[in-house]
């Protein structure tokens, strides 16, 4: 065949042309210059990152007529034959199909012979991890002490499958995954050389689909070029490659963040109709939300998010009004559902269920704010306990606070008022208990907090000159009633009710059993108020916690 695919046509021929593997190529070039090249070298790393390419360049560098040299000429007989794959002294062996012990024994016999015309006889074994254990054992002695004219270069994507006895005899170099931006720039250079017009957005899509492999990226680009009769649109490229449009991911995340369920279901339905792999769509969406969370955090974004700059800008815009806590919640839920969707027989339905479940999540408070509010709640409960002591009232904890605030705003007006506040309904022949009930009812209308202190008191004596109130032995009730402002209020109310000026006497009654009951009742109310507080319920829900006990200190 006369056509040469892009991956072979633009294969690097020198160390300088290798993309983003400077840590390997620089080390090898220095080793050649200082004559410190190891007799056994292992290249490991993901597919399509240049392992076999660098092995060939190293072979040329060692056997070049000007060498060993870090810059092979690519013109001499040795360099030309290695480039074309026809060198008599450089053997490229596929470890998957030559993995038996008999083939390694044959290799051991051949290494004894001198190279035909080069300095070194070099064995490049690709996917070396595929060799059998017996084959590895047969290679051990030769690998450790080979003849001076022999070099071994191994390449593998799975170094963990190689026996440690082999690894310890090799100098290892780890290749890295190529970032999207570098692959994009490399494809732009190739498109310029080929005179092919294609948009940056489309090239970015191809680079992402390559998943760090230059070879995969060039294979996809080759496919796009083959299908074109001119300039291809982005939608045409999507159809040719059958990949998921990045815009779809942004549309889904927008619908999720804005709570738009109908729009979300419509996007998923359209993706399903286009024939997208729904499991892959979900995997891409989980990764997309991970990137949104990283972008929101705002630190080391270019390093942690392998995306073109314009996509990162779109992400920054999308999450500017969303809290990182909410994004973290969504990402956590998406990740937990990943296994269920991957194993589901109906992934589209499983995705819809998982995304709809997200809409039931309420945005959580940041952890530092949550802790601050919990501390505030604890302080509030302690202060309330100190203020209210063992008070007994039919009003709830919160009603007491609100009513006391309303009552305090009226105290000054009542003290200075000269008009009767209530109509006089006093009956001298009436029972003291009924009279007291009337007085408490009247006070409750405009002073509920003060009335709460009088509910469990009794009217002990009523004469023309004074009125005696007996108070249960409760420090809070006594202190509240004897306050100067409250006494002024009571004196005004009683005078208006009885139709004459009267002195108020406050006495104390000891009812220990009843007091103990009241204390327990108040403690129970405080505990219940703490349990029902929104901050406590949020903490239990967010951290999936379990409440063991509530202590009132």
Image: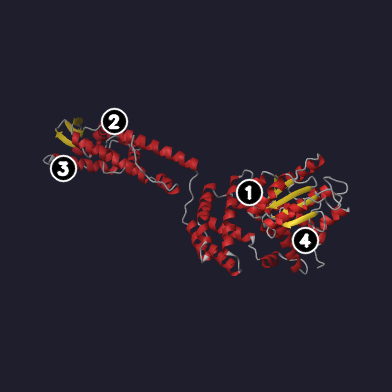
Which residue in the protein does label 3 denote? 434
Labelled disc at residue 6: 4
In which quadrant will I find the N terminus? bottom right
Where is residue 441 drawn, in percent x and y? 23, 43
> Whole-Å distance between the Cαs marked 1 and 4?
36 Å
Q: Secondary structure at mark 3?
A: helix
Closer to the N terminus: mark 1 or mark 2?
1
> Whole-Å distance between the Cαs marked 4 and 3?
103 Å
Instruction: Give the foreground label among 1 and 2.
Output: 1
Closer to the N terminus: mark 1 or mark 4?
4
The residue lying toward the viewer, choosing from 451 and 369, is 369
Q: Secondary structure at mark 4?
A: helix
Labelled disc at residue 483: 2
Instruction: Give the foreground label among 2 and 4.
Output: 4
The residue lying toward the viewer, choosing from 316 and 417, is 316
Q: Secondary structure at mark 2?
A: loop
Which residue in the protein does label 1 denote? 163
Instruction: Give the foreground label among 4 and 3.
Output: 4
Where is residue 98 drawn, in percent x and y? 70, 58
């Amino acid at each position: 065949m006369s056509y040469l695919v892009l991956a072979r046509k633009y294969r690097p021929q020198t160390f300088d042309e290798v993309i983003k593997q400077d840590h390997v190529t620089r080390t090898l070039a220095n080793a050649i210059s200082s004559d410190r090249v190891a007799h056994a070298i292992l290249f490991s790393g993901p597919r399509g990152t240049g392992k076999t390419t660098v092995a060939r360049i190293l072979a040329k560098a060692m056997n070049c007529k000007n060498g060993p040299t870090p810059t092979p000429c690519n013109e001499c007989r040795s360099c030309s034959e290695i480039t074309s794959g026809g060198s008599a002294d450089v053997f490229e062996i596929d470890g998957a199909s030559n993995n038996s012990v008999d083939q390694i024994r044959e290799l051991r016999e051949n290494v004894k012979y001198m190279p035909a015309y080069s300095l070194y006889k070099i064995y490049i074994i690709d996917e070396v991890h595929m060799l059998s254990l017996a084959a590895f054992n047969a290679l051990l002695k030769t690998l450790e002490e080979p003849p001076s004219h022999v070099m071994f270069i191994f390449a593998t994507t799975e170094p963990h499958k190689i026996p440690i006895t082999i690894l310890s005899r090799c100098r290892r170099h780890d290749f890295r995954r190529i970032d999207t931006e570098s692959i994009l720039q490399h494809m732009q250079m190739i498109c310029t050389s080929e005179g092919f017009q294609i948009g940056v957005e489309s090239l970015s899509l191809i680079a992402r689909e390559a998943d760090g492999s230059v070879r995969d990226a060039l294979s996809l680009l080759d496919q796009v070029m083959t299908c074109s009769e001119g300039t291809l649109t982005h939608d045409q490229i999507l159809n040719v490659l059958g990949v998921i449009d990045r815009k779809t991911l942004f549309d889904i995340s927008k619908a999720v963040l804005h709570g738009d369920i109908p729009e979300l279901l419509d996007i998923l339905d359209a993706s399903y109709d286009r024939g997208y792999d729904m499991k892959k769509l979900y995997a891409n969406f989980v990764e997309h939300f991970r990137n949104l969370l990283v972008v929101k955090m705002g630190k080391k974004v270019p390093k942690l998010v392998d995306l073109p700059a314009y996509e990162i800008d779109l992400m920054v815009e999308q999450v500017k009004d969303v809290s990182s806590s909410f994004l973290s919640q969504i990402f956590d839920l998406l990740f937990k559902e990943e296994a269920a969707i991957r194993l589901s027989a109906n992934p589209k339905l499983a995705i819809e269920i998982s995304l709809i479940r997200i809409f039931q999540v309420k945005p959580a408070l940041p952890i530092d704010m949550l802790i601050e509010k919990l501390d505030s709640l604890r302080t509030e409960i302690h202060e309330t306990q100190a203020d209210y002591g063992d008070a007994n009232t039919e009003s709830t904890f919160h009603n007491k606070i609100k009513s006391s605030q309303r009552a305090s705003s009226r105290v000054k007006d009542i003290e200075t008022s000269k008009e009767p506040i209530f109509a006089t309904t006093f009956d001298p022949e009436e029972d003291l208990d009924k009279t007291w009930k009337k007085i408490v009812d009247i006070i409750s209308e405009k002073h509920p907090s003060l009335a709460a202190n009088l509910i469990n008191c009794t009217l002990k004596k009523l004469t023309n000159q004074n009125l005696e109130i007996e108070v249960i032995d409760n420090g809070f009730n006594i202190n509240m009633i004897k306050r100067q402002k409250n006494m002024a209020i009571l004196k005004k109310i009683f005078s208006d009710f009885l139709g004459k000026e009267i002195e108020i006497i406050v006495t104390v009654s000891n009812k220990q059993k009843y007091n103990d009951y009241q204390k327990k009742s108040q403690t129970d109310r405080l505990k219940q108020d703490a349990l029902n507080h929104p901050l406590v319920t949020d903490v239990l829900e967010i951290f999936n916690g379990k409440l063991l006990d509530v202590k009132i200190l």
